Image (cartoon, helix red, strand yellow):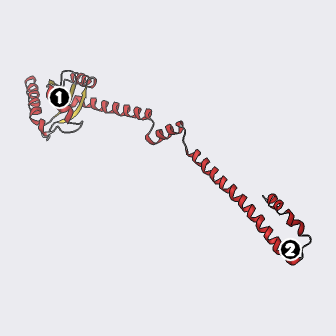
Amino acid sequence: MLWITLWNEHDRLEGFAQMNVAALLPATLVLAIKLMAAALALFAVVALGDFVWQRFSWYQRQKMTRQELKDEYKNSEGNPEIKAKLRQIRMQRVSKRMMAQVPKATVIITNPTHYAVALRYEPGMAAPLCLAKGVDAVALKIREVAGEHDVPIVENVPLARALYASVDIDEEIPVEHYQAVAEVIGYVLRLKRRRA
């Protein structure tokens, strides 16, 4: 840019040698301003180009690859394999704890094969307590453990389904089932008295 500017002024530059000092200073000042303007224009173009390039490069670096997206999802949501394993371990612990409670039950209320709910009642309790519940394989396991420990098993399809749906483990049964459960527990206690 400086060479182009000076080349355009080459006719005047030859005249600088014959100029007196008073005229040379303003002419040199004009030439210096032109050279500075040319240099600044070039720097402005380079700076603008650099700004555009840096912005583009920054934007490209912000884009994530497919693998980075997967990794970020795993980090934020947790690794699905680990979550599944933890869920499985929790379920095993709950199942083991539940099966350990079955021998303490007063009665197991079942649908013949699909549902089983283990209840415990002792005089002085406000309401019977659900110790364990399960469907299909868990229900069969509850029945098996109950059989090993001589816990009475009573088949009552609607009550078993209703209790399974409405009560959680270690909770008292809902009020609406008091009457039906009281009849079952009364029946079981009468059987125990006869055996004794």
**Residue flagged by tag 2: what amino acid is it?**
Leu
Q: Please report contact status of discs 1 and 2: CB closer than 8 Å, yes or no.
A: no
Quarter of the image with the N terminus in it = bottom right
- Residue 176 occupies quadrant: top left
What kind of element bears circle 1? helix
Amino acid identity at mark 1: Ala
As rendered, which of 50 and 72 lies closer to the eye?
50
Whole-percent x and y of residue 58? 59, 49
Return the x and y of residue 148 as percentages of the image width and height.
23, 22
The residue labelled by disc 1 is: 160
Other residues around mark 1 within 10 Å, as few (<14) / some (14–19) / many (≥20): many
Please report the residue visible at 56 percent of the width from the left and 46 percent of the height from the top: 62
**Image check: 84 left or right of 155?**
right
Quadrant location, the C terminus: top left
Q: Is residue 87 left or right of residue 164?
A: right
Residue at position x 8%, y 31% from top? 183
Judging by the rendered image, the residue that carries numbered circle 2 is 24
Can you name the residue that lies furthest to the right here? Answer: 18
Residue at x 83% of width, y 63% of height: 9
Task: Tell which of 137 and 30 is nearer to you.
Answer: 30
Q: Position of residue 174 (x, y in %)?
A: 15, 39
Q: Nearer the viewer, residue 193 or 91?
A: 91
Q: First in sequence: mark 1 or mark 2?
A: 2
